[in-house]
Amino acid sequence: MKRFTANPMTTPKYDWWWGKRVNDNVPMSSQENTRPIEEHLKVIPYELKVIKQDFEKRSSKLGKKIEQLEEEKMRLGLDVDDQKLEAEKMRK
């Protein structure tokens, strides 16, 4: 790194700041805790798999509930038909 000094009398604080400065005051990233991009991309399919399984489980539950409601609707419809027939018999 080139150092331009207009005044040779700099403070230790300025020297510390200048040493930390990289590319016009953009701090360098720490490479200690970084993972390769391949590791980041491996996480995504796993999360998608979990979401898909959760969706399928909920979908299955809702499908069963729909079937139950349709059966109940059919039974109630038959009950209404029976009551209509009884009402007609009583009118006659």
Image (cartoon, rainbow, N blue to C red):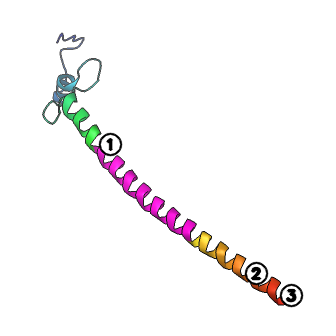
Q: Which residues are magenta?
A: 47-71
Q: Is residue 35 magenta?
A: no
Please name the amino acid that badge 2 sits on.
Answer: Leu
Q: Earlier in the sequence, mark 3 or mark 1?
A: 1
- Which residue is found at the position 55% from the left and 69% from the top? 71
Judging by the rendered image, the residue that carries numbered circle 1 is: 48
Q: Quadrant of residue 7?
A: top left
Q: Earlier in the sequence, mark 2 or mark 1?
A: 1
Say if 19 sits above or below 52 in the image: above
Q: Quadrant of residue 37?
A: top left
Give the image location of residue 86, x and y in percent.
Answer: 76, 85
Q: Nearer the viewer, mark 3 or mark 1?
A: 3
For the N terminus, the quadrant is top left
Judging by the rendered image, the residue that carries numbered circle 3 is: 91
Mark 1 surroundings: few (<14), some (14-19) or many (≥20) residues within 10 A: few
Secondary structure, mark 1, is helix
The label shown at residue 66 is: none
- Which residue is found at the position 25% from the left and 33% from the top? 41
The label shown at residue 85 is: 2
Q: Nearer the viewer, residue 3 or 58?
A: 58
